[in-house]
Every structure is written in structure tokens, then in C-alpha cells.
Image: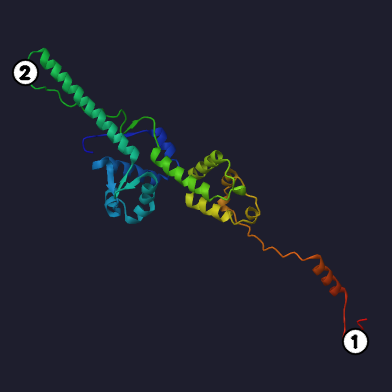
Amino acid sequence: MPDIFYLPLYVSDYEADTAHLTIEEDGAYMRLLRLCWRTPTCSIPNDAEWIARRMRCSMSDFERLVQPILSEFFVLEKGRYTSLRLLREMEKVQRTRDSRKQAGSKGGKAKALKSQQDQPSKAKDLPVAKPKHLYLELESVDTSVSTHMRDQDFEEFWNQYPHRGGAKKGKSEARKSWDRAIKLKTSKAEIISGALRYGQDRQVLSGYAKDPSTWLNQRGWEDDVEADQPKQTAKSDTERRLIDVAARTRFTPNDDLF
């Protein structure tokens, strides 16, 4: 928005929420936030060429850097990408600006009544407070958008993991292990794919599976799966005795049977 000259940034939570990003990805995310902030409705169209042109990047860089950031941190609705947190901050700044306008108007009217002058108020809109720092205002952060997406990713893993005996236990510890793995730049697709492979492991099929948190801490998605061996059909006692007799007895055409 052209009449709001600064972008509030809550640094502590921003760092916590983006610790897994590379320096390129972090820069792309920040540029997307600035682009949305200066765009009407605080949103941008779902148009790769439009975004790439304003991000000043090639289409290959858009697909490699920008699109993953949009998918992780933004919500696509009615053909436009929106950061819900950024939209709330925009509304907060607008409310602050409007309240200051009203206060200035009331102050001007009171002054006019006191001086008995029937003149319109000369009060002007108070300027929006500028940040104390060069670019960004520092406060504390809400990470509702990305947190919601991480919750969905973890739930997908939790439902796909081959829980021992079908009993889903230790979810809170598994969530902590999941978050640590994601912060180490492991993709959710790699982890979930590994969990599906682990479900075909010989030990899992025989009834034993590691706790999800243990599997995550041991980076189980990198392990090979031990295939299940086909079971041999057990022979009856009678069959075993006949085979034993046949092995010890050698008949020839001239042998007497009695």
C-alpha cells in the first residue's frame, strides 16, 4: 500500500520460522513479503510471469526458489496468494492510522469551540510512526500460517507411519523429532516416502516397528528396507517320515519287496 511506509517485522519469530531456509530462499521470502505489502489487498496474483517480473528473477529461479516459498508460507485463494499474517499486520496499521486521524479531528474541533471560531478543523492526519530502525520494526511473532502448514505435514506423516500393532503412541515426542528433521532441511516428501517404505520392512510386517520419534531421530528414511522372506510350508510328521525312509532305502528292479 503506497501510504504505509514501513513493514512491521517481528524478528524473533521470523528467525524461528525461517531457520531452515537457505540465504537465497530467505531473500526470496522477504522480497515476496515486500511485494505483497505494496500491492492492493496485500496479495499477488497466481501468475508466475507476473511474480517473476516483479521479483526480478528468471523463470528457472522462480521455479527453484520462489514457488516453494509460496507453497510453504502463502495461502492461495481465488487466484491470489496471500500471507494471512501480513494481511493482519496491514489491518492493524490501518486501524492505528484511522484512530489517529479521529483523535486529530476531535482535537481540532475542541480547539475551535474553545476559541468560539466557527472554522473547520485544521487538524491534519498524523503521520504513521516510522520505525526506529533503518528498515524494519522489531517486535514479537505469530507464525500461524506456516505453523498450520507444518501441522498438516506432520499429520500426513503420522497417518502414514506403520505404528506398532496399529496403536498410535508418542505423538508429542514424534512431533518434536519431526520439527528437528525439517529444520535440518529434510523435505517432508523424503520423510513420508521413507515411512511408507519402512512399512514393507520384514520386521514391521512381523509385528515390530520402531516408535516414530526413534525412527525420526535415527533418520530412518535413509535406511534400506529388509524385504520379507516367503514362508516355507511346514511338512507334516508323516511326510517327514516318508522322506526319511526314501532317503535310507534304495530299491532296484531285482530287489525282493518281501
Q: Amino acid at mark 1?
A: Asn
Identify the residue shown where x is 46% and y is 42%. Answer: 151
Q: Name the secondary structure under disc 1.
A: loop
Question: In the picture, which quadrant includes the N terminus?
Answer: top left
Q: Quadrant of residue 140?
A: top left
What is the x, y in percent for residue 113?
11, 15
Q: Which mark is residue 118?
A: 2
Q: Is residue 26 left or right of residue 114?
A: right
What is the x, y in percent for residue 150?
45, 43
- Where is 126 relative to 195, above or below? above
Q: Residues within 10 Å of mark 2 (few under 14, many from 20)?
A: few
| Distance Cα–Cα, label 2 vs label 1 | 141 Å
Q: Which residue is denoted by mark 1 in the rendering?
A: 254
Is residue 128 among the parts visible in the rendering? no
Question: In the picture, which quadrant includes the C terminus?
Answer: bottom right
Q: Residues within 10 Å of mark 1 (few under 14, many from 20)?
A: few
Q: Residue furthest bottom?
A: 254
